[in-house]
Image: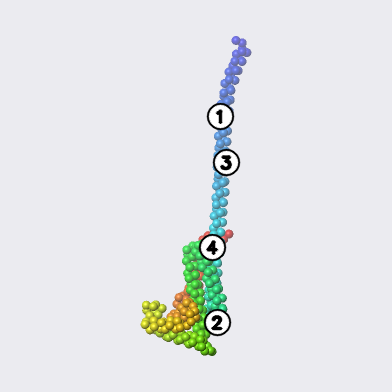
Amino acid sequence: MEIETIAAFAAAGVAAVAVPATLLVGRWQLRTGLRAAEATARAGIAQAEATYRAALDGVKAQASATQIQWRRGVQRESYAAFLLATHQVVEVSDRLARDVHAQVVDEASAAVLAAEVRQAEASLRAAMLVVTLEGPDTVAEAAEMITNSAFILAGGCERAVARQLVTRKLDRMTETSGGGTDAVRCGHAQQLRNALAQLGSTIYPVPDYMNPAARTPAVSAAIEVVDAALARLPTGTFTAFERIELLATELSRDPMSTELYALASDDLEEQKMMFVRAARAELDSAGPAA
């Protein structure tokens, strides 16, 4: 065999061996590239997830802070509205009290002031409900105490006005310049006044005269005389509420001179301070204002 032929066969064998080796090296390189690409992809995904989680946490934190700030604003407004409503009830009650002491109340002015009292009481009641809804319990409990005291003051003033008006009404009925029906009505009114005065002098020594079970026979008899005097007057002369106030004028103390009224008046300012302290503690617990 010629040397050229042998060389050709040898070269072919080397080439045949070189081809699989090249394929094997290429496959290794491909796998290495795939692994690197996969690792890069995993790192990218992990980075993207971390970025997303960080962004999501930031959004949640911002939303939470916004929610807290919004709720704090709602609470602050409800607390302020409650204090304002309380001031309105106290202010109109003070005006009623001044008019009662000055004895300048008439039916027209009493009607106007009574309407203002009812409006102020309704506003206070609504404001207290909002505070109760917003909480917390410490603030709601302080608001309830203030509301009770304010209603006691307003109710005492309203009843004092009612008694003053019904007393003046009875006084006018005892004054007449004519005869006939007016004179008879005047006589019956005078009998009622005398009966009320007798009731007042009878119950004075009785400490618990408001309790029917503790009344003496003399007190019970005096009340029956008042009822009989009222029955002699024409139907509708006094409303049911006026009849109650006529009796209450003698059966109980001035509504603005009772221990309950005095206690409510004395406690109101301290109750306001308790409310303000509780409200501040709640608002401060939400963090500094934005």
Q: Which mark is residue 104?
A: 2
- Mark nearer the viewer, 3 or 2: 2
Could you say where residue 207 lies in the image, as x and y percent from the top left?
39, 81
**In terms of sequence position, does the residue under pointer 4 or pointer 1 come before the other?**
1
Q: Which residue is mark 3?
A: 44
Q: Residues within 10 Å of mark 1 (few under 14, many from 20)?
A: few
Q: Which mark is residue 247?
A: none
Q: Which quadrant of the figure has residue 220?
A: bottom left
Q: Is residue 83 visible?
A: no
Q: Amino acid at mark 4?
A: Gln
Could you say where residue 53 lies in the image, as x and y percent from the top left?
55, 47
Find the distance from the CA under tag 3 to the CA under tag 2: 87 Å
Find the distance from the CA under tag 4 to the CA under tag 2: 41 Å
Find the distance from the CA under tag 2 to the CA under tag 1: 110 Å
Q: Which residue is mark 1?
A: 28
- Mark nearer the viewer, 4 or 1: 4
The reply to whether callout 3 and callout 1 are in contact (CB within 8 Å) is no
Q: Amino acid at mark 2?
A: Val
Find the distance from the CA under tag 3 to the CA under tag 1: 24 Å
Q: Which residue is mark 4?
A: 75
Q: Nearer the viewer, residue 174 or 100?
A: 174
**In terms of sequence position, does the residue under pointer 3 or pointer 2 come before the other?**
3
Find the distance from the CA under tag 4 to the CA under tag 3: 46 Å
